[in-house]
Image (spheres, grey):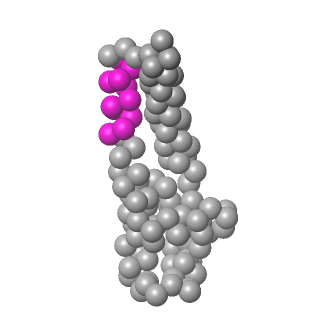
Amino acid sequence: MSHKGRSSISVKRRAHAPAFAALGDETRLALVAKLCAGQRHSISQLTKGSKLTRQAITKHLRVLENVGIVHSVRTGRENRFEFDPGPMKEMKKYLDLVSEQWDQALSRLKTFVEN
């Protein structure tokens, strides 16, 4: 891979690191799973069945909102949160690129070992 290609991956890694970090928490992953159904949920709906407080859920939602994975829409007196697939699609592209690099490296190693 060229130096330019490696540099591009490094830039993408830095760009996606906050989103990967946000998803590194079990509670936030559970919130994303609930929101992936496509419906907007209030904080009280997202807190239902959880041992966490509304304040704790709000804090986790803000982390996800800061990286663009969810966003809130004001409905009357409450905020409703919904999933935004855009950042996840970009993260998948990055993971596909990294996977391709590993496949190429393993292929070169296989060729080297077999020859």
Residue 46 against residue 36 in the figure, above or below: below
Residue 8 against residue 38 in the figure, above or below: above
Relative to residue 38, is residue 20 drawn left or right? Answer: left
Residue 22 % position (x, y): 39, 58
Residue 112 against residue 11 in the figure, above or below: above
Q: How many marks?
A: 0
Q: Nearer the viewer, residue 73 or 68?
A: 68
Residue 41 against residue 17 in the figure, above or below: below
Q: Nearer the viewer, residue 66 or 27?
A: 27
Dominant secondary structure of the magenta stretch? helix
Q: Nearer the viewer, residue 53 or 96?
A: 96
Residue shown at 54%/64% (left/top)?
Answer: 32
Residue 2 % position (x, y): 37, 14
Residue 36 appears in the figure: yes
Which residue reaches farthest front?
Answer: 114
Residue 31 % position (x, y): 52, 69
Residue 104 appears in the figure: no
Residue shown at 38%/29% (left/top)?
Answer: 9
Relative to residue 15, is residue 92 drawn left or right? Answer: right
> In the image, is residue 83 part of the stretch drawn in magenta?
no
Which residue reaches farthest top?
Answer: 115
Residue shown at 51%/84% (left/top)?
Answer: 50
Relative to residue 49, is residue 27 drawn left or right? Answer: left
- Tell me which corner region of the image, top left, top right, bottom left or bottom right, holds residue 27: bottom left
- Tell me which corner region of the image, top left, top right, bottom left or bottom right, holds residue 38: bottom right
Q: Nearer the viewer, residue 89 or 43?
A: 89
Q: Which residues are magenta?
A: 4-14
Residue shown at 56%/86% (left/top)?
Answer: 49
Residue 88 % position (x, y): 53, 48
Question: Which quadrant, please, contains the N terminus?
Answer: top left
